[in-house]
């Protein structure tokens, strides 16, 4: 027994394993200390998040380099074994490998970053973390109307960036085009109705249009895309029931619902002040012609016993 223990103690492989274990523990301890220091001294949330991710990445790289340095003289002897094992592992863990490849694509391909609103794997929400295997989203929508959080935190495999389209609401152009429709009764002052919508649009979303114009010009220079109007525009269409006015405007991607609320409130206020010249339409049924009614009464009969 003593000979076996002595053999183990003087075995170079055991010594290297112990050295690798101790070295990894030291790297982990240093990484944790640096992450806590970053959380303590860095106040900006975005900078703090990026610094912690950088520390984690450097810790992984340091661990890999340490193990590779310790076992460098053994790698040549294990080349064939590593090749066979690597083929089996790659087949068994192909989804994991695809997720790691997706993480590399996200990190260096500028697909999205923390704080962006994205739709990934059929899930829409704000991206709050990018891990090696999964992206974490604070979900929007589902049973909650509009672009509001519903409270669920969803983790989506990074491999989805290769399988489905990645919708980014805030990458190069953090604005969205939106529109509201309003039915106006026939006989109303149609010019005044159009003027109300244009005036309210400029009042409520005019600042968005001014800020979005410069950003859109950068998008046009970067991509092969045509110019598009960012100012509020009003169009009208006449149908069988009413005149339908549509206000198209540009808005911050996180303020779509509350902006629509402000627009409707201001439009209703202006219509109330029109003195009846503009009236909102509603669904109604008009009977043009009634078919003739024919009534007949059968003669009363008495029963005989």
Image: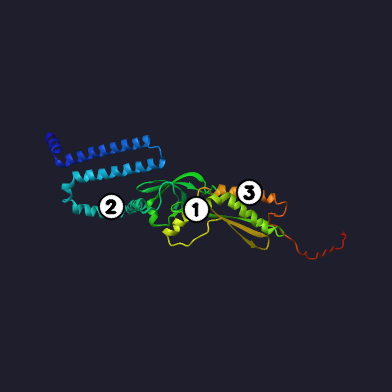
Task: Give the mark, 3 or 1, whose residue is nearer the N terminus.
Answer: 1
Judged left or right of residue 127, residue 232 is right
| Residue 117 locus on image (x, y percent) | 46, 49
Residue at 21% x, 46% y: name it: 68
Find disc 3 in the rendering and name its residue: 266
Circle on res. 230: none
Q: Height in image: 223 above or below 116?
A: below
Closest to the camera, between mark 2 and mark 3, is: 3
Would you say residue 272 is visible in this rendering? yes
Residue reaching furthest to the left: 3
Most foreground residue, 207 or 190: 207
Task: Give the mark, 2 or 3, whose residue is nearer the N terminus.
Answer: 2
Most foreground residue, 50 or 94: 50
Find disc 2 in the rendering and name its residue: 89
Of the 4 image quadrants, the one containing the N terminus is top left
Q: Residues within 10 Å of mark 2 (few under 14, many from 20)?
A: few
């Amino acid at each position: 027994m003593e000979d076996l223990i002595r053999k183990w103690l003087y075995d170079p492989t055991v010594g290297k394993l112990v050295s690798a274990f101790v070295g990894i523990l030291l790297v982990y301890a240093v990484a944790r200390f640096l992450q806590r220091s970053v959380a303590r001294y860095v106040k900006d949330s975005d900078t703090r998040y990026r610094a912690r991710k950088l520390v984690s990445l450097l810790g992984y790289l340091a661990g890999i380099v340490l193990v590779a340095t310790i076992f460098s003289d053994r790698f040549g002897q294990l080349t064939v074994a590593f090749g066979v094992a690597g083929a089996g592992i790659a087949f068994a863990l192909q989804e994991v490998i695809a997720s790691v490849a997706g993480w590399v694509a996200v990190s260096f391909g500028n697909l999205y970053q923390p704080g962006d609103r994205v739709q990934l794997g059929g899930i829409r929400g704000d991206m709050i973390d990018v891990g090696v295997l999964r992206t974490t989203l604070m979900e929007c929508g589902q049973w909650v109307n509009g672009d509001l959080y519903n409270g669920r935190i969803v983790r989506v495999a990074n491999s989805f960036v290769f399988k489905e389209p990645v919708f980014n609401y805030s990458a190069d152009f953090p604005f969205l085009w939106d529109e509201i429709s309003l039915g106006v009764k026939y006989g109303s002052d149609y010019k005044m109705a159009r003027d109300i919508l244009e005036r309210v649009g400029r009042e409520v979303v005019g600042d968005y249009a001014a800020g979005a114009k410069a950003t859109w010009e950068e998008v046009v220079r970067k991509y092969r895309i045509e110019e598009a109007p960012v100012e509020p525009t009003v169009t009208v269409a006449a149908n069988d029931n009413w005149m339908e006015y549509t206000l198209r405007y540009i808005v911050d991607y996180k303020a779509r619902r509350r902006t629509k609320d402000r627009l409707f409130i201001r439009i209703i206020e202006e219509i109330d002040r029109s003195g009846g010249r503009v009236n909102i339409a509603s669904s109604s049924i008009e009977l043009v012609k009634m078919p003739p009614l024919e009534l007949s009464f059968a003669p009363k009969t008495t029963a005989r016993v």
